[in-house]
Amino acid sequence: MTLEGRSVSRGGALIVLAAGAMLVALSVGNPQSSSVHGDGYYTYLWARTIVFDHDLDFANDYTTCTDPWGMASMPHGLAMNQWSPGAAIFFAPILLFDLATHHPALDNADPLVANACIGALAERAVHGSVLAGLLALVLSFLAARRFANDGVAALAAAGALLGGPVLYYATVLLSYGHAASAALGGLAVWAWIRQRAPLEGRDTSEPRRPSGLAWVGMGAALGLAMLARPQNALLVILPLWHWIEIAIATLREGRDRDADGSMIARAQWKKLGPHVGWGVAFTAAVLVVFGLQLYQWWASTGEIFLVPQGDYYLRPESPRVMNLLFSSANGLFTYCPLAYVAVGGLVALAMRRRTRGVGLPLIVVLLITTWLNACVADWWGAVGFAARRYDAMTVPFAIGIAGAVAELARALRTRPKLAPAIALTTLLLVGTAITSSSTMTVASGYRSDIAQPSTELWARDSATLQRALFSAVGNPLAWPASIPFALRHGVHPRVWDQASMPELFFHRWLTLETQRDLTTLDLVGPHAALAIDFDDALAGPRGTFRFPHGHGGRVLIPISYPYVGSLRLTIDAIPQSLDAAGHGEVDVWLALDDEVLGTFHVRGGQAQLNVPVARPHEGIVELRLAIANGTLGIARIEMRDRDPHPEVAQARRNARLRARRVAWRIERGLAPEGTE
């Protein structure tokens, strides 16, 4: 078989086929009863509204079907859908096929099933995500084989997909749009890289001049990627980088020296003019394809560019980069360790002159993608698999893995003794780990003299090894964040797992209402590890509390919304001495990071302490306590809003947006007169 003018090796083809078969097998073995739910339901509705209603307005969909998130009437508009249409490219053809063949579900007595809202038609349609995953696999292979042989490229493609964040959405949560984003984002990367790194010569130090049709193709591919997720517009960096390189090279052409030896710059305007024209054509192709989303926004709201999730969805002033990458809550590197290899490979490509033209722009895309993902209010991505917002980096990660393997192969060729040293070291580490963990397992009571399934020993060995490793050094995959965190706060690196969790005091980005289940730090429950220099929980007549070792302690608090009005501490104050009336006070000095909150005189037996907070605080902050004339136990710390609560002002802004958008829909006949 030949692809792009070069035959594919049998080994490479077999690896790609095996990876594709594994993807399909995992989707068949999906343990979830339904593939259409949650956010993915609204992603799927794009396909339904196109195929069944032949429009891009969701008012009738929310009437015919269910509307679990209440999108039909939102605080900031009507018939909103904050998810993207790109997945419909993969879902809609399956729906069209079922319509053409008159699938039995169309005659179902349940109108929700017959109208493809739920049930067989919807479940079948979202299997388009499996097709998207397979397309992402093939595109990853095509891109990676420019930097490695077919076998390595196939392994890199398999690693990027099966060892990356998209696998879950190509096999389990099929109704979500992340597999489509991986495929369409990958298409945009491949359309660029086939111009930037042609197979016949991998030297990318000098830019190749694409044809006009190639520029239009790159623009159309980018538009498709943006339909999957608007943030994929960041991929414009790749063709833009290429375009600028060619423009600079064009301006430098034709320079020579006069009789005095000075430079005469003769810009090749006749050559630059067409280049500018193809840049315009590229932009037009992007807008034409992405116009589907732009039109839907305009038709529904009267606005072309908007963030439908609301004002507070993005927080560019305070990105949580380290949490995003290394958190135990859906961190990229902690859940997808192959990303380390991919990033290392991209760096290696950027450092070599021959491949710098590919490696450097891909690193820039990765850095800006990371910054943007870290700016999202729920940087952890809510419920789902880790780092899903890196979906469009699947093909770049495959390129990076291929680059890393190529770099390793180069090192082994120049240092032939390195390969056996690496192999021997790996065997020693693995063998030592297995024997050491088995030793501790037997020491803890496991009967090795009794025949038992090997899985029992493996499970206990694994748990023993993991506990020992975590107890000693924390999670090694999080070291780039956990070690600096530990040094900064004077704690063990394993505390990072708790401190980097989804933050408390989270406010819903559309309304700025406090999410009530995320306002309290429970020091005697799930957040016990965040109490530093405190004794274990002690139960007493007034409840269970944590008391400092001595005359003070610290509490680490991960805070999402920065404008905390006050802290309400549930406490147990025990004075050192009592007066004649049996009363006494404990003096407590408190500071939150660099803000001194004051000294408070707490009566013995007092149940709560309200502490006003004046300055904004966010991220992982440190509450410090100094206690005199007794001791003070703490059970919980509740964060409370300022007065007036932020949702009051946000409600007024949302009401203005809603009024304007409702008026627009009434004017266009999409909402009846009198709609509020």
Image (cartoon, helix red, strand yellow):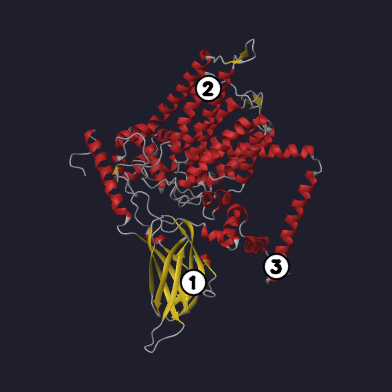
Q: Are marks 2 and 3 in contact (CB under 8 Å)?
A: no
**Mark 3 and mark 1: span between their CA atoms?**
42 Å
The mark closer to the camera, 1 or 2, is: 1
Q: Position of residue 158 (x, y in %)?
A: 61, 40
Closest to the camera, between mark 2 and mark 3, is 2
- Say which of 222 and 273 sits in front: 273
Q: Is 210 situated above or below 562?
A: above
> Which amino acid lies under the numbered mark 1 shown in the image of this protein?
Ala
What is the secondary structure assignment of the residue under circle 2?
helix
**Label 1, label 2: how many angstroms apart (C-alpha)?**
67 Å
Q: Tag on residue 214?
A: 2
- Where disc 1 sits, the SS reads strand
**Along the line of sight, the residue nearer the viewer: 659 or 259:** 259
Label 3, on which residue? 440
Q: Is residue 139 above or below residue 428?
A: above
Viewer-nearest of labels 3 and 1? 1
- In this rendering, the answer to whether 481 lies above or below 95 is below
Along the line of sight, the residue nearer the viewer: 574 or 579: 579
Residue type, mark 3 in image: Met
Q: Nearer the viewer, residue 344 or 112?
A: 344
Q: Residues within 10 Å of mark 2 (few under 14, many from 20)?
A: some
**Quarter of the figure that contains the C terminus:** top left
- Residue appearing at x 45%, y 25% in the figure: 283
> What's the amino acid at mark 2?
Ala
Residue furthest left as drawn: 674
| Residue position for label 1 | 626
